[in-house]
Amino acid sequence: MRIRRLKPFYSLLSGMVVIAISSGLTAQSTSSSSSSSKTRKHARGASDGIDTGSIANGVYRNKSLGFTCKIPDGWVLRTEELNAVDEDGAAQAQQDQPQTAQKNAEEKQSARVLLAAFSRPPEARAEDVNASILIAVEDPATYPGLKDAAQYLELVEEVAKKQGFESTEEPYEFRIGAKTLPREDFEKNVGTRVMRQATLVTLERGYAISFNLIGGTEDERDQLVAGLEFQEPSRASVPTK
């Protein structure tokens, strides 16, 4: 069964990512502009208790959701900025349309960006594609009828196409270590450049996670995918739902 209704969080999130990559973020922060060797703890998630993970030695780790992701040397982080843009947008919507905003806020309270990393500051202009990693988590209960990761990928595909991306082939199963995830690849022409995106999704411990990796070439994109690893989630740190 296809889940037709797109919820506000992922639609807004996808739009922010496209803007961040092709136009640049207005929010800037020097405190999150490098993936240094020092351990950096992310702020705890919203009231649902999502574990937002930590970064150390250029690797993002989320023990409760059971995965790690390598961040290439010299990349800049914009995780906090993307979450802040989402919160600011919700606040403005609350003023403009209080009833709709309240409903949307309830749907988004279990959703957030876990990692947003770019090969250069999004506000810095250049001729080549700004390679990026975006990992987001949602409560799949937001989508009544959602049963598996393949259905969640359909939602991501729909949003990606609305943002101008075209699927290069049908979704397929992609194996990373002992885990197999649904994957779909997309392309988007941006002037003289082509953005090549790989999206993988999974359902872990009651949460839907999407991994969106963009490069200027297939090799660059696939190298980012190769930086993903999956382990058994830590039961001790998984929030009770």
Image (cartoon, rainbow, N blue to C red):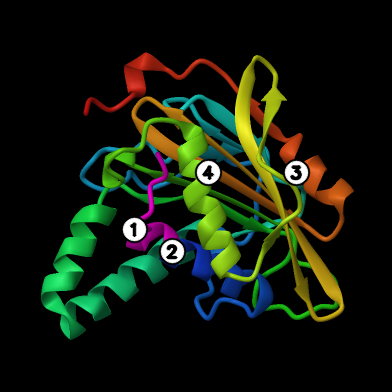
Q: Is residue 11 above or below residue 54?
A: below
Question: For the residue carrying disc 4, how many other residues have a C-alpha within 10 Å: few (<14), some (14-19), or many (20+)?
Answer: many
Location of mark 4 (residue): 153
Q: Magenta stretch: residue 117 in it?
A: no
Q: Residue furthest bottom?
A: 96
Image-quadrant location for residue 10: bottom left
Q: CA distance from mark 3 to mark 2?
A: 23 Å
Q: Residue furthest front?
A: 1
Location of mark 2 (residue): 11
Magenta part mainly helix, strand or loop?
loop
Image-quadrant location for residue 39: top right
Mark sitting on residue 7: 1
Rendered location of residue 55, percent (x, y): 56, 40
Cβ–Cβ under 8 Å for marks 2 and 1:
yes
Magenta range is 1-11
Rendered location of residue 232, percent (x, y): 51, 15
Assign a secondary structure to mark 3: helix
